[in-house]
Amino acid sequence: EAKKQGKNTVAFYTSELNIQVENRLSMETRLHKALSRGEFSLHYQPQISLNTGSIIGMEALLRWKTGSDGFVSPAQFIPVLEETGLILEVGEWVLHEACNQSVAWEKNGLKDLRVSVNISALQFMRSDLDVTVQHVLQQSGLDPRKLCLELTESMIMIDSSRTMEKLESLTSLGITLSLDDFGTGYSSLEYLGRLPIHELKIDQSFVRRMSNTKNDAAVVNTIIAMGHGLGMDLVAEGVESKEQLDYLYEKQCGIIQGFLFSKPLPATDFAVFCSEWGPENVLLMMKQ
Ligand code: C2E
Ligand code: MG
Ligand code: MG
Ligand code: MG
């Protein structure tokens, strides 16, 4: 009986594994064709200033819509893009698309918005990211001050002398740099203070837990205080509740991004959101 069960269990796992490998392979194949088929798009999530109440910009987030399965979660396909190296080509497309869209919006009267673009480790490791970014800025005509690149702690912790050079050549283009998912890596404070980074994005895991867990609230306070001390802007991502908003306002976190204000939106919906947004909306959102 036990032996029989064991056999079944093995059979079950084997077929499960096959399905995973098959999915993975077919995903890889489908991702290869996705760019030329126009299956990628960007959604834009607004970032709101708590000082002025206005929209200061948006994060561009990659979306993949397949003919058969609809939208596939970035958590599923971005690792595959990274492992296969396809992220280099797709990442360049993302940069072009985000900058072109920003220029188009500006021409249509959506002024003073900054677009943030996620950069993967592989893109950052390439020595010519600065050349790519410069090319994209030239081609699109976007004011460099309106482009922000989101990097992560882990990619800037490797090989510090080369990293410093890379960051400096990027900032010399006039763009801004942000550290995404901040607090989950192991940045040394001394090193962080020397880097030409303009902004810290507090990882959403801390934001999610800070109302319930003292430690997470302490981490959020510390990141905000440290960022201010280093002259950086602070962005909280994953803000979903009024309580979280109130807390971050009290701690003087300057910029808020999260479902409380808006989910990431397709380009046309984002423009509508902007046209309907008023700075007083922030006050209305706050707890009385
Ligand atoms: P990220 O850069 O940290 O982006 C923030 C993620 O949090 C997004 O997930 C966004 O939809 C989600 N989010 C925003 N506000 C809330 C909220 O209030 N609640 C919750 N639960 N989630 C919220 P998304 O779009 O699924 O992207 C996941 C990750 O995929 C991104 O994390 C980023 O690391 C990566 N990614 C997305 N687009 C690109 C891209 O163009 N290039 C690269 N290299 N990576 C990308
Ligand atoms: Mg990001
Ligand atoms: Mg993030
Ligand atoms: Mg994240």
Image (cartoon, rainbow, N blue to C red):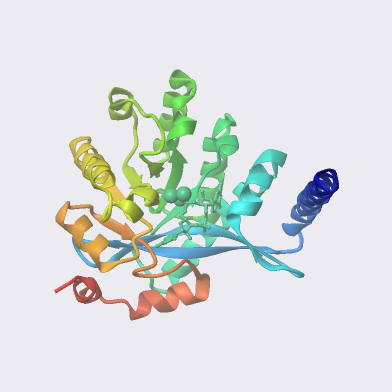
Q: Is residue 93 visible?
A: no
Residue shown at 34% from the left, 69% from the top: 260
Q: Nearer the viewer, residue 104 or 60?
A: 60
Residue depicted at x 35% and y 55% = 208
Is residue 188 at least partly visible in the picture?
A: yes
Residue 30: x %, y % from top left: 78, 56
**Is 277 drawn above or below residue 189 in the view shown?**
below
Q: Is residue 14 left or right of residue 165?
A: right
Residue 130: x and y, percent? Answer: 52, 36
**Residue 248, located in which quarter of the rendered image?**
bottom left
Q: Answer with left or right where residue 99 lies relative to residue 10.
A: left
**As rendered, which of 277 and 1 lies closer to the eye?**
1
Q: Nearer the viewer, residue 78 or 173?
A: 78
Q: Position of residue 108 (x, y in %)?
A: 43, 74
Left or right: 184 in relation to 214 = right
User: Residue at point 34% right, 48% down?
Assistant: 206
Image quarter where the C terminus lies is bottom left
- Residue 171 position, x and y percent, is 39, 37
Position of residue 257 in the picture relative to residue 156 (left or right): left
Looking at the image, is 63 positioned above or below residue 28? below
The part of the image, by quadrant, that contains residue 151 is: top left
Q: Nearer the viewer, residue 100 or 241?
A: 241
Q: How many marks?
A: 0
210 to 230, vertically: above or below: below
